[in-house]
Image: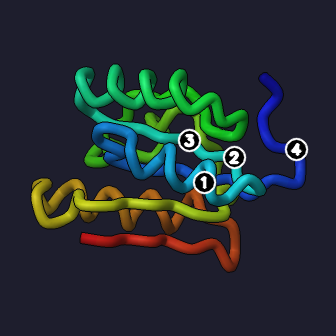
Amino acid sequence: GAGAGPGALRVLEVGAGAGLHSAHFARALPQTRWQPSDIDPRALQSIAAYVEATGVPNLLPPILLDVSQGWETWGGTQPATLDLLVSINMMHIAELRCTEGLFKGAGVLLKPGGVLFTYG
């Protein structure tokens, strides 16, 4: 179906895992355009299943993303286009270079006034 309108807040979720958070937040925040991502193919399958099952129009199909790689590889996200970058339950389990990559990417991809939200 059609996603959220052109005025939608653009969100990239890094390390979305099973996709439970993505589905919850996309449903709770219909004014967002929610892009889940993960590095694990099994996680991507699970997220895709959640996207399918929830049928929320503003929840996009997941993309493969390795946060330790440069932002240029992050699914074509352009500099200063994101309103929100979300990372839940990643930093404490991932290698330090992933956290460093997250902050570097956030610095480039977030709009002025954009928010990096981390939890866990």
Give above or below for 83 relative to 6. below
Crowd class of label 4 (few under 14; some 14 to 19; many from 20; radius 10 Å): few
Give above or below for 55 relative to 80. above
Q: Disc 2 designates what residue?
A: 33
Q: Nearer the viewer, residue 85 or 110?
A: 85
> Considering the numbered disc 3 on the image, is that residue within a helix, a strand or a loop?
strand
| Residue 40 image point, x, y percent | 23, 29
**Which residue is at 48% across, 63% downward?**
106
Q: Disc 1 designates what residue?
A: 11
Q: Is residue 85 left or right of residue 26?
A: left
**Mark 2 vs 1: CB contact within 8 A:** yes
> Considering the numbered disc 2 on the image, is that residue within a helix, a strand or a loop?
strand
| Of callouts 2 and 1, the N-terminal one | 1
Q: Disc 4 designates what residue?
A: 5
Q: Which amino acid does the dot numbered 3 rest on?
A: Gln
**Mark 2 vs 3: CB contact within 8 A:** yes
Q: Which amino acid does the dot numbered 4 rest on?
A: Gly
The residues tagged by marks 3 and 4 sit, at their Cα atoms, a distance apart of 14 Å
| Of callouts 3 and 1, the N-terminal one | 1
The residues tagged by marks 2 and 3 sit, at their Cα atoms, a distance apart of 7 Å
Q: Is residue 7 left or right of residue 46?
A: right
> Considering the numbered disc 4 on the image, is that residue within a helix, a strand or a loop?
loop
Name the quadrant containing residue 3.
Answer: top right
Give me the disc on residue 35.
3
The residues tagged by marks 2 and 4 sit, at their Cα atoms, a distance apart of 8 Å
Crowd class of label 3 (few under 14; some 14 to 19; many from 20; radius 10 Å): many
**Mark 3 vs 1: CB contact within 8 A:** yes
| Residue 113 image point, x, y percent | 68, 79
